[in-house]
Image: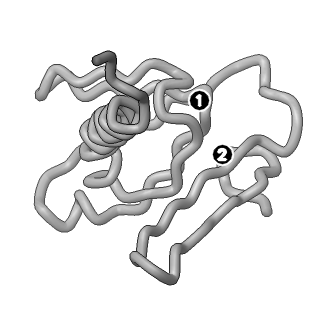
Amino acid sequence: MEIPYFQEVILMASTCDACGYRNSKFKAGGAISAKGKKVTLIVRNVEDLSRDVIKSDTASVTIPEIDLELAGGTLGGLVTTMEGNLKAPEKEKEKAKDKGKAKLTSEETPD
């Protein structure tokens, strides 16, 4: 698949029929280019939050107005909306917290 401003990419998407969970990620299909590309999106209204955004796994996202900075590699490659980009860090924190709870409940506790 070729996407404007990107090289060839591999799109991975999955859906759980049992719970409805959906996930989509993509990886570069070729070498990382020597120079990056800066893209600026100015959000003026609620509809702008629904705009599709494709973030490579090496891209960083900075939103100074809300003091948010996601370094390259933080969330991997994402195919989402601008709103999804804003919610992604919180979702990752919740997933990590849930994994920690599952680990604690599955380990034996000392007597």
Helix, strand or loop at mark 2: loop
Residue beneath disc 2: 5
Residue 40 visible in the snapshot = no
Can you tell which mark lies on residue 22? Answer: none
Q: Is residue 98 left or right of residue 74?
A: left
Look at label 1 and name its amino acid.
Answer: Lys
Q: Is residue 2 left or right of residue 3?
A: right
Residue 78 % position (x, y): 52, 48
Camera-side residue of 83 and 97? 97
Look at label 2 and name its amino acid.
Answer: Tyr
Q: Residue at x 37, y 40 (%)?
A: 102
* Above or below, 69 relative to 76: above
Q: Residue at x 69, y 60 (%)?
A: 12
- Quadrant for the C terminus, please: top left
Residue beneath disc 1: 37
Q: Residue at x 48, y 34 (%)?
A: 75
Residue 35 % position (x, y): 70, 19
Camera-side residue of 3 and 107? 107
* Above or below, 110 relative to 4: above
Question: For the residue carrying disc 2, how many other residues have a C-alpha within 10 Å: few (<14), some (14-19), or many (20+)?
Answer: few
Q: Are marks 1 and 2 in contact (CB under 8 Å)?
A: yes
Q: CA distance from mark 1 to mark 2?
A: 8 Å
